[in-house]
Image: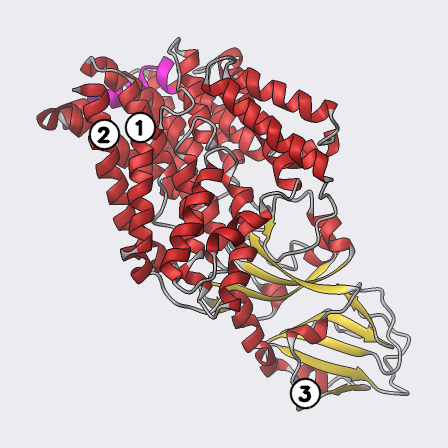
Amino acid sequence: MPFEIAIVLFVVVAMLVCLMKEVARPDLIVFCALAILILSGVLSPADALRGFSNEGMLTVALLFIIAGAVKQSGMLNQVVTKALGSGKSPRKSLLQMMVPVAGLSAFLNNTPIVVMFTPVVRKWCMERNISPSKFLIPLSYATIFGGALTLIGTSTNLVIHGFMLEQGLAGFSMFQLAIASFPAGILGILYMGTIGYKLLPSRKTSEQSFNESSREYLSEAVVEPNSPLIGKTIEEAGLRSLSGLYLIELIRNGERTASVPSYKKLMANDRLIFTGVISTIVELQNIKGLRVETGTNLKLEDLQNGSASLVEAVVSHQSALIKKTVKENKFRSKYGAGIVAVHRNDERINTKVGDIILKPGDTLLLLGNKDFVNRWSGSRDFYLISPIEDPEIINSNKSMIAMATLVVMILLAAFNILPMFKAALLAVIILFLTKTITFEGARKYIQFDVLLLIACAIGIGIALEQSGTAALIANYFVQLTKGAGVIGAIVVVYFLTTTFTEVITNNAAAVLMVPIALAMSTQLAVDPMAFFVTIAVAASASFATPIGYQTNLIVYGPGGYRFSDYLKVGIPLNLLYLVVTVMIVYFKWIV
């Protein structure tokens, strides 16, 4: 085996293992893999950096800005509420919700759609005594169905499109992917309204669980008159070093301080609210001058008023918070919010909050002050789920400009008046010139970690192709499926892509498979479009785990789901998509 092929295989396998084990953020892992290929001489710096000028990657960056402008317009918030209807027939409401959501996701980034609509759907369900767990996974799946319909529906489609352009191929047209994904999406919606609805659990949401079990983790203590603690700081009083409890709020003369700083000095009659392991409350009882309030039934609503509010947030799989304890993350000082409780896999974690090691998908119940939203707004660490007042809602004229610009961009690309990149570039220029979005706002909406991952993954794809590794792997799969013919090769490509998507990111899965698929199409002497469409659909069709696709992760905690719920509902849907996609691709592009 040639040296270069051995190096590339080693680096790619090591990268996949690191991604599966989540040893670091995906973009950092892929960047390190690319750096090793450059240092080993397998890739020249010029080839390695081609991903940073790739048309598909740059189009994704522009679409982040456009989607952000549409999101902040506030025009989409009423769409789902109207679509859900009265709720007299939950299954009918489910179908009515999924269709417009899929339609929106065909043209907008699906992550902000799920972030926007999760609290809307959950509130609608709770007002009608319907379990939100019957609706939130379908919400996520609907955005996946829609994202696979068009060239701009998901960044993965644009990445494959960019690779095709680099190879001198025509690339995808706006609705070409819908030939396979539209029938699959229709069947997927029908499945969710029938079999899927039965398989979905009927569970309490994380919010309901937090509320009902509040007495299990909230406790209160009062600083007594003439207490030796008066005048001491929180740190000096030993309230930061409790083994099982975590101070989240101080109430003084009716005024509340959420995220209590260590330097805050205690006064007589201060009320201190703690969260954590109630069985360790003896720690408070042993502190002289502190009276533990027994027999009180603290409720979550008692913690908030005009200056302090409760918010739910879901930890992102790309978060810098993961694999560290709350204390190590310095969460309180960094975000200006205290963590009241953490919900994971349909259960509250019953331990001291500061000692909890955070994982992707954890739902955090936060008590924050007014500064919390400002601190959170630029963070990629978690998604804000609870509805909060958005200070950036723009006026109605600019809302219309944002929507009109999106429609014009789609029409220009759909009728081949302009290439997708130029249409998106023109749209962004219009948004800036009309001041519909500011440069500061645009920077907030661009997901630089996703762009870095895409650009580096493209460089690794180039290494697979140039070194001959892709051709070697392709030859192995061609020989493996020789008895089944071309359709067997398509099935293998689909299966590998969707498997990679479930355990690593969809963009990385697509970029790894594209050069291999191109080599397979060359060896089989068939239209490579068959394989590219297969990869595009398979990379989006992530239904079986909450970690494969970030929209699944967003609804994981708020819906009160368990990992097994995704397996139960998602595996049949994965198989359905595989069969429909492979059959349509075979008869459209092969026969």
**In the picture provided, is 331 more to the left or to the right than 538?**
right
Residue 85 highlighted magenta (yes or no): no
SS under mark 2? helix
Q: Is residue 504 visible?
A: no
Mark-to-mark CA distance, 2 and 1: 8 Å
- Hey, which residue is sitting farthest top in the picture? 168
The tag on residue 179 is 1
Image quadrant in which the C terminus is located: top left
Task: Report the predominant secondary structure element of the magenta stretch.
Answer: helix
The tag on residue 329 is none
Magenta-drawn segment: 464-475
Whole-percent x and y of residue 524?
A: 19, 16
Q: Residue at x 52, y 42 (%)?
A: 111
**Between disc 2 and disc 1, whose residue precedes?**
1
Q: Which residue is mark 2?
A: 584
Q: Amino acid at mark 1?
A: Ile
